Image (cartoon, helix red, strand yellow):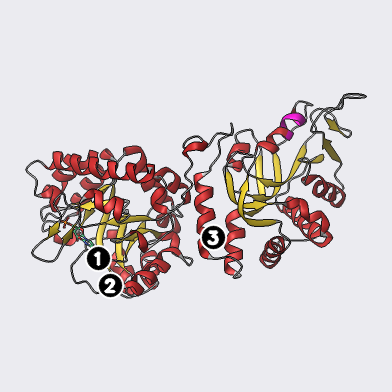
Amino acid sequence: MVTKSEDQMKALALKLFEINAFKFGDFKMKVGVNSPVYFDLRVIVSYPDVMQTVSDLLVAQIKELKLSSKHVCGVPYTALPLATIVSLQQQTPMLVRRKEAKAYGTKKLIEGIFQAGDTCLIVEDVVTSGSSILETVRDLQSEGIVVTDAVVVVDREQGGAANVAKHGVRMHSLFTLSYLLNTLHEEGRIERSTVDAVAKYIAATQINTDGSFIGGDKASIPNDFSRTKLTYEIRANLAKSPLTKRLFTLMATKKTNLCLAADLSKADDVLDLANKCGPYICMLKTHVDIIEDFSEAFITNLKTVAKKHNFLILEDRKFADIGNTVSQQYGKGMYKIASWANLVTAHTLPGRSIVQGLKAGLSNDNARKERGVFLLAEMSAKGNLIDEKYKESSNKIATEGGDADFVSGVVCQSSTCFGFPGLIQLTPGVKIDEGVDNLGQQYQTPEHVVKERGADIGIVGRGILQAANVEKAAATYRDRLWAAYLERVSK
Ligand SMILES: O=c1ccn([C@@H]2O[C@H](COP(=O)(O)O)[C@@H](O)[C@H]2O)c(=O)[nH]1
């Protein structure tokens, strides 16, 4: 029996690229928007070895998943030869769906011998919206045939799996587009920028069951896929961690990209501030070590306020030690930060081990899904020592490697810090009046940080804390930051 090995999958991915079964460019798609990537699996009939491998892998997949069925049926036309080989290898009778009923003779849409109540497994080459699978399912079902599963060669990850699932069909793909892109990149065949560009396109073109685009019609799909031009809804689809997705979604639904820096030294003052400003913020940022009367009760109350007003808590601890120490600073000590802060900040100075150390401070994998870190790649302090190379290396830690899924974003001052749209740019040093304080903090206006510097979330501390009416000030900052974001994505 053929099994699916990682090496075999990689080799096939490269082979498909070599024979132009998938290519990069600007292609007109059935769904009505152009795509930077196109699959043409029709060509594989000219490569018997590729046909053999693809069908072997499909059969291995069917066996692995124990997908037993009375018939197999390929979605016309490209998948027909694949379904034929699967039928032969499995000795499972085939059904053939005609695209149009014959005008003479039996006028049947489904050819082959079957009875109502028989089960049938669908075979498909490439799935975008899933509409072609559903057309075949519809014709089989109208003959009383039961369809619960489909095996496909490539899932373009544009919503097809979810769409067919809504009609009771589970989709099992050999390859996802992300896997293919990453494999080609790892093997040096395509640039990281191509991977990112295609990922942005895929996130922006998620398709509903009815063929419409999630988040608007065709006209609303941007042709500029740079991070700052995409909406938070679209970027939520690209985020690697559940927590980052949650934050993007929270921002989009609550319509706020304001983070309040609660730099106060009394626990009750922080709670009072959080209660007053909670409705306007997506995140409350703490410096827990400046709270003089810190207690567990404070944390319990803060979590209650966060839940009531639907914001996340970011502890701006700026971890910077070796992994082993960081894991203890995060999980232990009097603050037990890992137990309550959704997010923390960390310097990238120690390298990748900073992220590994934080992950090690969490008790289990489930906890990791609910926690994340913002890495500091730039600082707002005048005369800070960070240079371009440091920024670039921080970007690599944030976006590459096995621990990048724990990174929710980057604390920085410019849009050039990172390009990956699944991460969030957090920018401090925001005040209605630009300027520098007496200890070197540099301020820019809400509009400037969002539109010119690429901030996704603006951090405001004293701009709100020192206002006569903190609630009113929070509302003003929320309005200005949000309006700047809307303007940025609409132009
Ligand atoms: O580069 C950085 C990183 C973090 N901060 C933090 O943000 C707030 C800013 O407060 P303001 O009162 O608005 O100046 C503060 O908690 C800093 O620790 C930063 O300013 N710059």
Residue 337 is left or right of residue 60, and the answer is left
Q: Position of residue 470 (x, y in %)?
A: 12, 43
The answer to which of marks 3 and 1 sits earlier in the sequence is 3
Q: Is mark 1 within 8 Å of ligand 1?
A: yes
Which residue does the image show at 38% across and 44% down from the upper left?
Answer: 491
Cα–Cα span, label 3 and label 2: 28 Å
Q: Is residue 323 visible?
A: no
Pointers 1 and 2 in contact (CB under 8 A)?
Answer: yes
Residue labelled with disc 1? 379
Left-right relation of 251 to 470: right
The residue at the point 77 percent across, 46 percent down is 78
Mark 3, residue position: 194
**Between marks 1 and 2, how big is the CA–CA gap?**
8 Å
Quadrant where ligand 1 appears: bottom left
Q: Nearer the viewer, mark 3 or mark 1?
A: 3
Residue annotated with mark 2? 386
Determine which of the numbered discs, if any, sits on residue 307 in the image. none
From this view, report whether residue 259 is shown above or below residue 15. Answer: above
* Total marks placed: 3
Mark 1 closeness class: few <14, some 14–19, many ≥20 residues within 10 Å: some
